[in-house]
Amino acid sequence: MLAFLLVSACSSHLVHIKSDPPGAAVNDLQLGDLGVTDLTVQVGRDAPTKRESLNLTLTKAGYQTEKVDLLNVKKDQTIMVTLHSVPTTVLVETNPPSAQMEMYDSLGDPVELTNPSKIASQTTFANRRHIVSDDIRFIDLVLKQEGFKTLRKQIEIEPNKENRFFFQLEEIVGTLRLNTWPEGAAVYERSLGFLGRTPLELELKWDDLTRLSQKLDLMDTSDVNLQLKIKKTGYRTQESVEKFQLYLPNPPIFIDLPAE
């Protein structure tokens, strides 16, 4: 009589999981948290886990998440996972959203920016994510938007993470305050026409100010000229050129009307 001896071979294997740099948290899709690299996991039908495959996720602060799938492990093995640093990114959001953006380092040189979206543009705009050097710590930021005051701000950058900032830009609105003696005089401006009667308090917005400027870009100037004409029956017409500040409060203007 033949006797058959059934030998059950050992069906478990060791998986040594390492990372460069070490200290990455390792998580399996089914088993959950396995520990921190470097570590060893036993797999196979005879292993406590009863798992023959691993679906691993490695995470470490400052590094990109890495995924590794080991299917039907048949032997002991060692895996080495190289972790890649998270790039240092800057996202400057503004309202309104189309502001032009300039960035300078501590020496006043332009910061080298890489746009991951690969959007081709000669001008750098806000509301786009940019990669910067991991070594940079402070950036002098300049935001320009037509009709709004230029904003200058120093921002602090943390390496190997996304640095996100939001800025509300201030609309350019100037207030013209003008009075005469006697009151009730009609006020005209050469480009804007009739402004009202004294005492006059009038907001001048961007569309008004662009009509007053001789420059193509008001963002490059700090003031415009008001070419005023004041008329009142029984009094001599007065003409006056007044500087009107775009970014600073404007003092009241007072004009004495001589009788005819």
Image: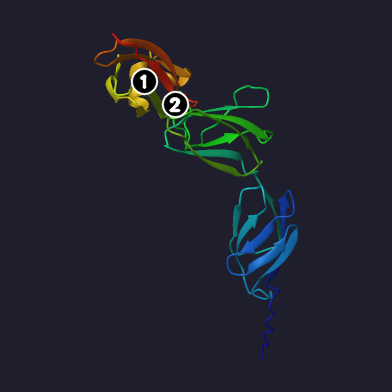
Residue in the foreground of this view, choosing between 217 and 238: 238
Residue highlighted by disc 2: 121
Q: What amino acid type is highlighted by mark number 1?
A: Thr
Q: Which numbered disc covers residue 63?
A: none
Q: Position of residue 21 (x, y in %)?
A: 73, 48
Picture residue at 65% right of the left edge, 64% below the top: 74
Q: What is the x, y in percent for residue 131? A: 57, 35
What is the secondary structure assignment of the residue under circle 1? strand
Give the vertical position of 126 relative to 218 (above or below): below
Task: Write down the quadrant of residue 181 in the picture.
Answer: top left
| Residue 76 shows in the view | no
Residue furthest to the bottom: 1
Can I make out residue 41 in this image? yes
Task: Give neighbour class at mark 2: few <14, some 14-19, many 20+ (Cα, 10 Å).
Answer: few
Query: For this rendering, which residue is in front, 164 or 11?
Result: 164
Q: What residue sits right under mark 1 in the picture?
A: 180
| Quarter location, residue 243 | top left
